[in-house]
Image: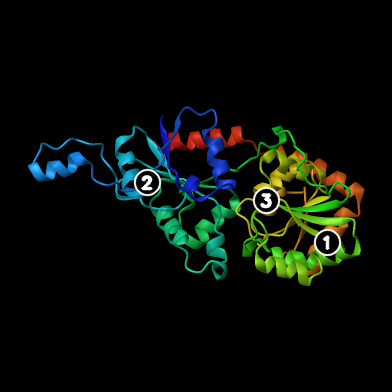
Amino acid sequence: MKVLIDNQVYENQKFGGISRYFNELQRENGNMERMPLFQHKPSVKKSIYDRLRSKFKLIPVITKQEFSSKDEFYNAQLNKLDYDVFHPTYYDNYFLNSLKKPFVLTVHDMIHEKYPEYFGTSPDSINKRRLCDVADRIIAISETTKKDIIDIFGTSGDKIKVIHHATNFQSIQSLKPPFNYEEKEYLLFTGNRNAYKNFLTFLIAVAPLLNKNKNLILICTGSGFNDIEKKWINDLQLNHGVKHYYCSNDNELVYLYQNAKCFVFPSLYEGFGLPLLEAFAGKCPVVSSSGGSLKEIAGDAAVYFDPKDIKSIRNSIYKVISDKGLQEELIKAGENRLNGFSWEKCRKETMDLYLRVI
């Protein structure tokens, strides 16, 4: 059996959960092949031979075929390569008119559909609906996401299989980042801060805690703060208490989890919530929103809050950081919870699904 994947996510995402997921599916898996990457070659001036050929009508030289677009190149690969099932890495449907083999689609979340006010009319959502209609099988990464696909797109539940993600952070050696925050205790916020991630509401909620306890700070990873975030941090008088650090590798991120007072996940909605497992692997107490699949994934290993209730967020964080016994209980529950998720299990269930499709 041969499974072919494309390059959509690798071309559009520098780092993130989806590229990590497809990397793990390929790990130690000789049955999975990734398409060659399209490389655009700019046009060049005609050679002397070309100019002479047109003038004196010389016999043309056969040259390597060039492709005018990325889609043309990838569709040519679909027709040329040997494989049994195709698994696109995101929702671009460029392949629908060329593909002659069955395909499996992974749906990572339905956030665009649940919160259209944050995304507008998204081509990703339009393409996702079309692909769900015609895919041979669909992988949903949580029961919550499966229910959303059925409810919003009207897709038959019979062709949707839930296969959970996992993490390998428990096997990654931690590496201390080059900063000097050791004298501080810190809350940890990881990843991007898009609107549905609820970061600004979280800032309002945590501001009194940071301003009251000067030994407590908030460390945020991911991209640097934008102008709006900087203004909010300044207006809330949090310049002393909110710091950004860009992790250059997973080793540094593991260190941040391992040494945080707690990890806070204020997102309005998640299709899975991979940082929960990363925090469990880092033996870090978790304080989380109850949005989307987060309770499904974290179970009894988190203290939950209403992501739209500022007092609920603040009180839940304070409850955890002020109770050493509760922190230890959450760490232990997180370790137990983590045992139910593994990339080996994910790979096996995914390969079994490919075989059923074939």
Disc 3 to disc 2, how far (Cα)? Answer: 43 Å
Q: Nearer the viewer, residue 259 or 117?
A: 259
- Relative image position of residue 275 (x, y in whole percent): 68, 48
Mark nearest the camera among 1 and 3 is: 1
Q: Earlier in the sequence, mark 2 or mark 1?
A: 2
Disc 1 to disc 3, how far (Cα)? Answer: 36 Å
Which secondary structure, mark 2?
loop
Q: Nearer the viewer, residue 249 or 290?
A: 249
Outermost residue toward the bottom? 235
> Residue at point 47% right, 64% down?
122
| Residue that badge 3 annotates | 296
Disc 1 marks a residue whose amino acid type is: His
> Residue at point 66% right, 67% down?
227
Disc 2 marks a residue whose amino acid type is: His
Disc 2 to disc 1, how far (Cα)? Answer: 46 Å
Disc 3 marks a residue whose amino acid type is: Glu
| Residue that badge 2 annotates | 40
Position of the N terminus by quadrant: top left
| Residue that badge 1 annotates | 240
Outermost residue toward the left? 57
Position of the C terminus by quadrant: top left
- Relative image position of residue 219 (x, y in whole percent): 77, 54
